[in-house]
Amino acid sequence: MDHKLRVLVRLDVDPSSAVLEVTGCLTADSWGSLTPLIRKTAALVRGHRITVDLTAAQHIERAALPLLRENVAGRDIDLRIECPDILPECPALVSAAGGAKQ
């Protein structure tokens, strides 16, 4: 399955924060494409408060979350990551498992 990552950067009138709304698949391979977006967004907001909203992501690999946190931490960015309590699995794997049961 092709794991595409889609990001919408939302800047409010308040120039001290921004939200990156992520849809698609956040994987151990794709997390790195978020870090330059986070840094560029932080340059636009004075307070450097960046929220990565993963609540609408189609698929989140557990291994991607610590990689993202560790590689952005300590860069004068107040990073907040919002994600569902139960991480969504890859739809291709769910479909394959569902098809195997039939």
Image (spheres, rainbow, N blue to C red):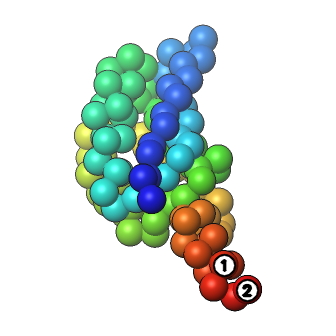
Labels 1 & 2 near each other (Cβ < 8 A): yes
In front of the other: 76 or 98: 98
Q: Residue under circle 2?
A: 102
**Could you say whether the residue bearing mark 1 is in a helix, strand or loop?**
helix
Q: Image point 38% across, 17% down: which residue?
A: 44
Q: Image point 55% across, 72% down: which residue?
A: 93
x and y percentages locating residue 55 in the rendered image: 64, 50
- Amino acid type of the residue tagged 2 in the rendering: Gln
Question: Image check: 55 left or right of 80?
Answer: right
In front of the other: 24 or 84: 24
- Amino acid type of the residue tagged 1 in the rendering: Gly
Residue 60 is marked as none
x and y percentages locating residue 73 in the rendered image: 30, 49
Q: Quadrant of the N terminus?
A: bottom left
Q: In which quarter of the image is residue 45?
A: top left
x and y percentages locating residue 52 in the rendered image: 50, 42
Q: Residue under circle 1?
A: 99
> Considering only vertical position in the picture, is 42 above or below 91?
above
Q: How far apart are marks 1 and 2 (CA)?
A: 6 Å
Question: How many dots with numbers?
Answer: 2
x and y percentages locating residue 75 in the rendered image: 26, 40
**Could you say whether the residue bearing mark 2 is in a helix, strand or loop?**
loop
> Considering only vertical position in the picture, is 38 above or below 61?
above
